[in-house]
Image (cartoon, rainbow, N blue to C red):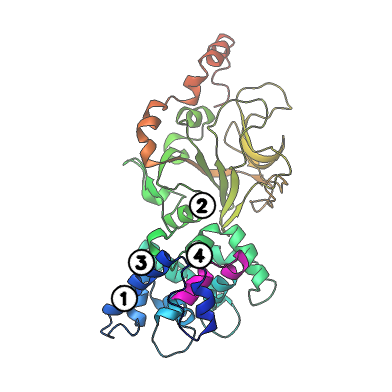
Amino acid sequence: MGNSESSSADPRYVAAARAFSQTELDDLRSLYTSLAAQCGSNGKYVSPSVFKAYIGIDGPLGDRVFDLVSQKRKDQRLTFEDLVVAKGTYEKGTNREIEEFIYQILDVSDDGTVGRSDLEAVLTSIFNNLFHQQCSDGKQIEVFINAANPTSDSMSFEDFQKWCAHLPAVRKYLGSLLTPSDSGSHVPKLLMPDNIDPGQILLTKEYAWHIGGALSDTDEWKLLYHSGVHGLSFNTFLGHMIKAPTLLVIKDKEGYIYGGYASQPWERHPDFYGDMRSFLFQLNPKASIFRPTGANHNLQWCAVSFSSESIPNGIGFGGKANHFGVFVSANFDQGHSFACTTFGSPSLSKVCQIYPETIECWGVVPRADDDRTEALKGTVLDRFKEDRHMLNMVGLANSSQ
């Protein structure tokens, strides 16, 4: 192990240095030397401005990270030993140690508690960095804070852990500040037709970043269907689907926005299908992710033109037939959202019965797979030619519009 730099008397540095290989320590030394050279300090320290430029964060959040990494000495100087000690915890520590470090980052006021104003400052800094805005939308920040549900006026460490579970994008971002080359802060590129008014789109860039935090691949998301353009029609919806994971986003007449990530293509089934990569999400009035709990495998639902009352026609996620986590009927005019054990989620709507106002669906397509996607662009209805032929014979092919 690399400990040739451990001549320091500081036991924290000695312990941290042992966590790195010699090559890793040499790389850290090279990084520090490069940063210190920009400060005119003869290699003795790194200044706050240079450090914040390196991590890509300014403002209160950048100040707080510098303060923690420099061991809160308040001398505006970051030494090589400071860098090793901080990274030893932040990159090499246990999950608990890393989370405790991140929890300290949230306390930008350094008063020993994490309050609402701290969360506002942190989220504002994140959004300004990600979206290059001088001032982020206060309403967007509000929906992320609403997911915290603190047990008191301040956020406890346990509250923080629950918050991170619902907001994996925030956890991913705050857990990558000292490794800018692998920042984990990628914002999906939203692709949509020219005839779509961006003002009609439910999935804002902030919401896309939030949902993308729960995915391993967030390159490009393509708008496949929008009810404001294509109409509220189940057959039209299915006709625009591709063989790729999708995001179903719903805004109901109460103004609530929510939906689900479908890891499998939307295809006709008489029962639940899908896999454990699927999840539900809320976007407004709070932003939360709800992953499968393992309680059951009732993940995705897509029933087309079944006549049995036990097989409700429409699309949905979780729960059970006629009591889904989220469901929209085949007429696209009503649906429901109940608390469900599949995802450990509450009702995502204000009331259980929902009336969709806008429905949109995005294909989650990695850039490297574009050629493959084009080859698989046959619609759901095309892939059910035999089903369609049979339905046409009895005059039911378009009965679900």
Query: Gap in Å between the C-alphas at discs 4 and 2?
Result: 17 Å
Say which mark, if any, is on residue 175.
4
- Do tag 4 and tag 1 residues touch (Cβ < 8 Å)? no
- Do tag 2 and tag 1 residues touch (Cβ < 8 Å)? no
Q: Looking at the image, which is closer to me, 34 or 17?
A: 17
Residue 198 is situated, as x and y percent measured from the top left of the image, at 37, 49
3 or 4: mark nearer the eye = 4
Sequence-earlier tag: 3 or 2: 3
The three-letter amino acid code for the residue at tag 4 is Gly
Residue 13 is situated, as x and y percent measured from the top left of the image, at 50, 79
Q: Residue at x 42, y 60 (%)?
A: 183
Query: Gap in Å between the C-alphas at discs 3 and 2?
Result: 20 Å
4 or 2: mark nearer the eye = 4
Provide the residue span drawn in magenta. Answer: 84-99
Q: Which residue is mark 1?
A: 33
Residue 56 is situated, as x and y percent measured from the top left of the image, at 36, 69
Query: Gap in Å between the C-alphas at discs 4 and 1?
Result: 24 Å
Q: Which residue is mark 3?
A: 133
* SS at mark 1 in the image: helix
Q: Residue at x 36, y 41 (%)?
A: 367
Q: Which residue is mark 2?
A: 211
Sequence-earlier tag: 4 or 1: 1
The three-letter amino acid code for the residue at tag 1 is Thr
Q: Is residue 226 visible?
A: yes
Query: Gap in Å between the C-alphas at discs 2 and 1?
Result: 38 Å
Which part of the image, by quadrant, shows the C terminus? Answer: top right
Q: Looking at the image, which is closer to me, 185 or 152?
A: 185
